[in-house]
Amino acid sequence: IIIENFGKGISSVSDLHKLCIHAFKIDESFAQNMNEDLMLRSHIQVGKVIRIKVIASGINNESILENLKELDCDQGEGTKFYPSITPKRLHFYSLELRTNFNTLSLCNFT
């Protein structure tokens, strides 16, 4: 189980220990806005402390990727790794997406 858009909306740190989750995805606004570095760092550290995988969304350039690696984020996703595709091209990827979703959607940093 993965919590999406962690840090936005109703997701709460106090709820994490109550749930049987494997990871949480940090909302892309934290990764893309370097002014939010303290918040990004805090979210990553929460994951480390409670021993769950931390995934950053919205990685679209090398600068964001390097910052997340430096902060010890576990995984990431974004157009830096897999550019957006048109609906027409999605048809060609659909079988592979169904059979091997994790390798197509996430990039391990370690």
Image: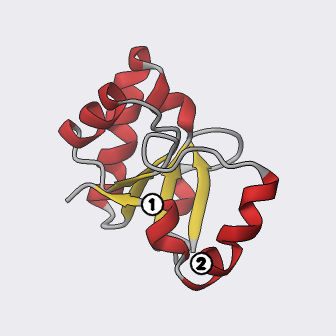
Q: Could you classify mark 1 by the number of other residues whose Cα lies within 10 Å: few (under 14), some (14-19), or many (20 or more)?
A: some
Quarter of the image with the C terminus is: bottom left
Residue 13 seen by the camera:
no
Indicate the amino acid at tag 1: Leu
Question: What residue is rendered at 35% in x and 24% in y?
Answer: 37
Q: Residue tagged by mark 2?
A: 96
Q: Which of 57 and 38 is in front in this view?
A: 57
Q: Is residue 48 left or right of residue 100?
A: left
Residue 63 seen by the camera:
yes
Q: Nearer the viewer, residue 107 or 7?
A: 107
Residue 103 figure quarter: bottom left
Q: Residue 18, percent across and down?
A: 54, 71
Q: Residue 58, percent across and down?
A: 52, 38
Instruction: Determine which of the numbered discs, if any, sits on residue 42 in the image.
Output: none
* Residue positioned most to the right: 88
Q: Residue tagged by mark 1?
A: 106
Question: What residue is rendered at 32% in x and 30% in y?
Answer: 62
Q: Could you classify mark 2 by the number of other residues whose Cα lies within 10 Å: few (under 14), some (14-19), or many (20 or more)?
A: few
Q: Nearer the viewer, mark 2 or mark 1?
A: 2
Position above or below: 33 against 54: above
Q: Residue 67, percent across and down?
A: 27, 31
Position above or below: 4 against 70: below
Quarter of the image with the N terminus is: bottom right
Q: Residue 101, percent across and down?
A: 55, 74
Residue 54 figure quarter: bottom left
Q: Which of 93 and 97 is in front in this view?
A: 93
Question: What residue is rendered at 39% in x and 18% in y?
Answer: 34
> Along the polypeptide, which appears first: circle 2 or circle 1?
2
| Secondary structure at numbered mark 1 | loop
